[in-house]
């Protein structure tokens, strides 16, 4: 049903996003599916044309910046590893990432991250939410925010898919105040959601008949009723059917052996490869998580065994995205909740260090071949202008075409900025 | 001519004052009205001004106040009998009506049949189960379950215990009362570790007590005064929190239980912003300070604990009992407002205050006078939940249609001019699916057998029930407030073999019953009555006729199964509208 709502009369971008955020009618997100009755066609078109996508690699527990992007060899805290030159003149990274060193020209690096929270339990959500100013509401994680602000792509696939080790399911708590439906569809170990495959007892014809009947009954029900419940309920069936069409995504037999070898057969490799295919299939936001980076003990052996997996899979991913021209519209971010202490503790480990760490990114209007900021010679603090996660959120939103200085969510009647209102995008990182 | 009446209670609920004033007197004397109002506050009563309770029932007052505020908004007509029956059955019995109940109600010509139905549902055998399921989801937020907790809730609602007594049982559990001791699970379930690395979340318990029993979420005031809500102070949090820090789960019993230590001194805390050291005694939401009483060493107990007999003893000063007495009290305005707002939400699909757990002065109710009236009368009726639900169900506001014929925009949800749609809980969805598909009647239960017994006695149905709850309930610790259908739920109903089996003809089930009907019109009517609790419309009939045309035997049964599936997965079935 289309009946007009206040925001349909005159719509600045701010108003439009606010309207989407209010969400009472945007049921399944601002996707092509839910837009028809909600926005004037021109706005709907504008959003539908936005084909930008995001791929977040999350190294949970806190990858060491000193054993990766910001090595400090031959200093008291440097540890045993050497640094190696990269394709960017003058820029060195840890010897544990030789393949990524060759990709440095295609990356942008921020070495001056300085964030607030040194705890996993509160630090992870803070970083994931872009740590906005506290307004008494629970902000969405990055993926849920994008699911809300951009909705699904024209593919109709769920906008926020999370590939992770362990169990899958639907993780609604990522959505914060936006409401459960903007949560993550989690694919545990990359496995498809339960019940994705139609059992043999139902032929595709029989399925078509019953789905058509369901739609007919729903249309009748929704007539002259508030539409949000029916939109939400119809949306999940649409997504389920769209996912079924992509069942091949979960068929590992269809993978090329060369791809498998390039990405690696370990968890991160398999999950990064699935992430590439999910992006190609049109998922708006894909997150890949690798656990176990909390190296309080035996930091160096841990990184010696873990870093090659990151090096292998992320470099293969970047290679593929650039080879296929996807870098033009896919933003890739590699980060964790914080870095690790320069000081080496009594268990030959490194502890939590939000004071000076690094984030890498590329694609979608990010200025490649850039290194922003630097740390002190011993790595203990940021030497240049420090950047918080809020600055990154502004930058990333900008890269995917959202004006984060203007756009707002609406939480009931409370307007909320989508990124920290005291912070701004980092122009050096953008083309 | 009429009278204003009201009553106040002292914060501990022990002294009560009732008053009656001629209406004319107060209406003409604004100063007197204000005086009465202030008296109400100073006596610790709810801050409601004089209430006209003498000549107006609560449901009439609801309609008067809702109507006054809805102003010019176009009203939906009254729900027709089918719409009303389904709605009130879901709300008060936790399930849809059977096709027999529906036809009987639709064919009943009595003008009083709605009131009769409401009363019979409130007195019926489904009511305690429905309330147990509702309050379980509301209070435990899917943290888990315990047989003793279920027993407590079932007892509370079967006996229609006053809400203050129910709340006191949860806050200061009495392990000596076999029917009520399971209430301790409200506390103990929140004192378990969520993982090997996670500490027990005592602040989370403090927060939940405020949220669920007083409608105030003090969570963000743990380390400093709330940054955006002026009413929520750190001292409020800390003064409540110290009660739970002084308490722990008691081990070694088969039922949930807690023990308290002797509380010796005020709690010291400081704001992470100002670093000023401060102290507080107990502080109870809506009731203020309770000084700590101390006793000389050795004299803290009126009944000393006995280690050998494993009896915990009885403290002379029990912070939990102080909390129970101060929070679940007649004089505590937050206590009554919180629960009437939550029950209003359950029945009307929207809270008068939203979010349900953010009562504060900058977040006023949409209908302030109504909220006060509900709270005052609910208190005056001894916190009688059954009475309140009956009044809500009798209002025109509740009995309006969720559909607005004609043209033009639908009025805002807060006007209640058109009934709001409501989420079905996983339990409501399960029982309704069982009723609709004829699974319960297929088992031919003896008259008077509850739904639960039928399912518990049938292994396959018990397994299905578990799977339904797993699929449609929210994850732990997420309030089930919004309608939040999931892809998981859709795929489950689309493809799960056990679900699909419900839609194959089996002796005595819906599909078999319909397949045996030669007349398609008759089959269409039976199908719609069974699943969506109404008679089919013209176009519904056409859809059925078109699909069943010339189909016989297996093909016909299959087509009926497809129709039933489409109705079961339709929005009409999976929401309360």
Image (cartoon, grey):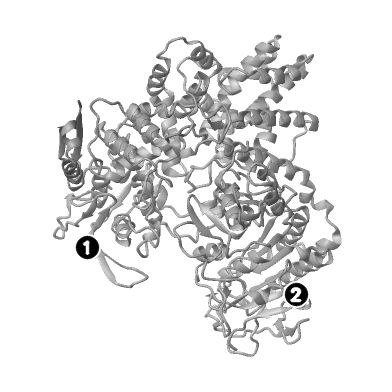
Residue depicted at 84% across the width and 66% down the height: A323
Q: Residues within 10 Å of mark 2 (few under 14, many from 20)?
A: many
Q: Identify the chain of the residue marked 1, using the numbered disc in the image.
A: B
Identify the element where label 1 is drawn.
Answer: loop
Quadrant in the picture for residue B536: top right
- Label drawn at residue A66: none
Q: Identify the chain of the residue marked 2, using the numbered disc in the image.
A: A
Image x and y of residue A158, in percent? 68, 49
Quadrant in the picture for residue B462: top right
Instruction: Choose between A15 and B316: the one closer to the eye.
Output: A15
Disc 1: which residue:
B265
Placement of A123 over or under A79, stated as above or below: above
Q: Residues within 10 Å of mark 1 (few under 14, many from 20)?
A: few
Indicate the quadrant containing the N terminus of chain B: top left, top right, bottom left or bottom right.
top left
Image x and y of residue B399, in percent? 45, 25
- What distance separates the C-alpha of mark 2 from that of mark 1? 60 Å
Residue depicted at 24% across the width and 34% down the height: B51
Placement of B354 over or under B495, stated as above or below: below
Q: Is residue B217 left or right of residue B89?
A: left
Quadrant in the picture for residue A61: bottom right
Instruction: Choose between B462 and B238: the one closer to the eye.
Output: B238
- Label drawn at residue A100: 2
């Amino acid at each position: 049903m289309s009946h007009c709502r206040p925001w349909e009369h005159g719509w600045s971008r701010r108003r439009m996003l606010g309207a989407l955020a209010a969400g009472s009618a945007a049921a399944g997100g601002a996707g092509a599916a839910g837009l028809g009755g909600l926005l004037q066609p021109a706005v709907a078109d504008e959003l539908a044309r936005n084909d930008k996508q995001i791929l977040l690699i999350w190294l949970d527990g806190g990858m060491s910046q000193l054993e990766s992007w910001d090595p400090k060899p031959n200093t008291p805290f440097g540890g045993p590893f050497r640094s190696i030159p990269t394709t960017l003149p003058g820029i060195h990274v840890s010897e544990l990432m030789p393949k990524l060193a060759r990709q440095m020209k295609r990356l942008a690096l921020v070495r001056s991250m300085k964030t607030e929270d040194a705890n996993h339990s509160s630090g992870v959500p803070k970083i994931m939410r872009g740590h906005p100013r506290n307004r008494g509401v629970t902000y969405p994680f990055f993926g849920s925010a994008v699911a809300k602000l951009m909705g699904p792509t024209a593919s109709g696939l769920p906008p926020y898919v999370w590939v992770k080790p362990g169990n899958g399911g639907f993780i609604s708590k990522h959505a914060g105040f936006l409401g459960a439906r903007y949560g993550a569809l989690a694919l545990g170990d990359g496995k498809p959601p339960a019940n994705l495959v139609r059992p043999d007892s139902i032929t595709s014809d029989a399925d078509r008949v019953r789905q058509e009947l369901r739609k007919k009954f729903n249309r009748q029900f929704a007539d002259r009723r508030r539409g949000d419940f029916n939109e939400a309920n119809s949306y999940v069936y649409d997504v389920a059917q769209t996912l079924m069409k992509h069942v091949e995504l979960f068929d590992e037999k269809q993978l090329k052996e060369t791809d498998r070898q390039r990405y690696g057969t370990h968890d991160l490799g398999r999950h990064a490869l699935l992430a590439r295919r999910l992006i190609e299939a049109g998922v708006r936001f894909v997150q890949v998580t690798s656990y176990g980076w909390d190296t309080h003990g035996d930091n160096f052996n841990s990184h010696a065994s873990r870093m090659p997996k990151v090096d292998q899979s992320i470099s293969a991913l970047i290679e593929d995205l650039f080879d296929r021209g996807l870098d033009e519209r896919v933003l890739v971010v590699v980060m964790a909740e914080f870095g690790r202490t320069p000081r080496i503790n009594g268990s030959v480990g490194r502890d939590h260090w939000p004071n000076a760490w690094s984030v890498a990114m590329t694609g979608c209007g990010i200025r490649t071949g850039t290194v922003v900021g630097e740390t002190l010679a011993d790595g203990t603090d940021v030497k240049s202008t420090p950047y918080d996660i809020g600055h990154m959120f502004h930058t990333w939103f900008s890269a995917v075409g959202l004006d984060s200085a203007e756009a707002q969510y609406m939480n009931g009647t409370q307007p909320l900025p989508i990124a920290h209102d005291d912070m701004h995008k980092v122009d050096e990182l953008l083309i | 001519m009429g009278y204003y009446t009201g009553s106040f209670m002292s914060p501990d609920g022990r002294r009560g004052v009732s008053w009656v004033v001629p209406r004319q007197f107060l209406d003409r004397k604004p100063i007197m009205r204000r005086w009465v109002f202030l008296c109400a506050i100073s006596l610790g009563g709810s801050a409601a001004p004089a209430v006209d309770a003498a000549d107006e029932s609560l449901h009439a007052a609801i309609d008067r106040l809702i109507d006054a505020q809805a102003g010019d908004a176009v009203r939906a007509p009254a729900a027709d009998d089918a719409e009303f029956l389904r709605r009130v059955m879901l709300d008060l019995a936790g399930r849809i009506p059977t096709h027999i109940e529906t036809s009987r109600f639709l064919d009943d010509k009595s003008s009083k049949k709605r009131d009769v139905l409401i009363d019979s549902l409130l007195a019926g055998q489904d009511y305690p189960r429905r309330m147990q399921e509702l309050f379980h989801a509301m209070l435990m937020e899917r943290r888990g379950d315990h047989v003793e907790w279920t027993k407590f809730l079932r007892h509370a609602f079967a006996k229609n215990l006053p809400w203050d007594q129910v709340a006191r049982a949860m806050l200061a559990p009495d392990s000596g009362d076999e029917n009520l001791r399971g209430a301790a699970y409200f506390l103990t379930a929140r004192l378990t570790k969520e993982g090997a690395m996670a500490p027990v979340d005592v602040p989370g318990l403090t927060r939940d007590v405020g949220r669920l029993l007083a409608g105030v979420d003090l969570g963000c005031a743990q380390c400093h005064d709330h940054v955006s809500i002026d009413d929520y102070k750190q001292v409020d949090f800390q003064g409540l929190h110290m009660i739970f820090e002084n308490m722990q789960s008691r081990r070694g019993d088969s039922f949930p239980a807690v023990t308290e230590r002797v509380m010796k001194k005020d709690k010291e805390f400081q704001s992470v912003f100002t670093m000023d050291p401060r102290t507080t005694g107990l502080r109870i939401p809506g009731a203020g300070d309770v000084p700590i009483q101390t006793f000389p060493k050795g004299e803290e107990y009126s009944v000393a604990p006995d280690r050998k007999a494993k009896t915990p003893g009885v403290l002379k000063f029990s912070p939990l009992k102080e909390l129970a007495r101060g929070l679940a009290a007649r004089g505590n305005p937050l206590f009554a407002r919180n629960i009437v707002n939550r029950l209003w939400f359950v029945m009307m699909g929207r809270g008068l205050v939203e979010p349900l757990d953010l009562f504060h002065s900058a977040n006023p109710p949409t209908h302030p006078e109504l909220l006060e009236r509900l709270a005052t009368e609910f208190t005056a009726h001894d916190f009688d939940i059954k009475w309140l639900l009956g009044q809500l169900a009798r209002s025109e506001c509740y009995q309006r249609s969720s559909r607005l014929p004609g043209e033009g925009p639908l009025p805002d949800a807060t006007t209640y001019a058109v009934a709001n749609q409501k989420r079905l809980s996983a339990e409501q969805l399960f029982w309704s699916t069982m009723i609709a598909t004829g699974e319960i009647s297929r088992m031919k239960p003896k008259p008077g057998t509850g739904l639960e017994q039928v399912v518990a006695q049938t292994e396959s149905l018990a397994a299905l029930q578990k799977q339904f709850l797993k699929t449609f309930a929210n994850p732990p610790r997420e309030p089930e407030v919004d309608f939040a259908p999931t892809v998981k739920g859709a795929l489950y109903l689309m493809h799960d073999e056990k679900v699909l089996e419900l839609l194959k003809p089996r002796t005595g089930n819906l599909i078999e019953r319909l397949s045996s009907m030669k007349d398609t019109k008759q089959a269409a009517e039976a199908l719609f009555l069974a699943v969506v609790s109404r008679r089919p419309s013209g176009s519904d009939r056409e859809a059925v006729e078109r699909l069943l045309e010339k189909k016989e035997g297996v093909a016909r049964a299959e087509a009926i199964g497809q129709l039933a599936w489409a109705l079961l997965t339709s929005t009409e079935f999976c929401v309360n509208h």
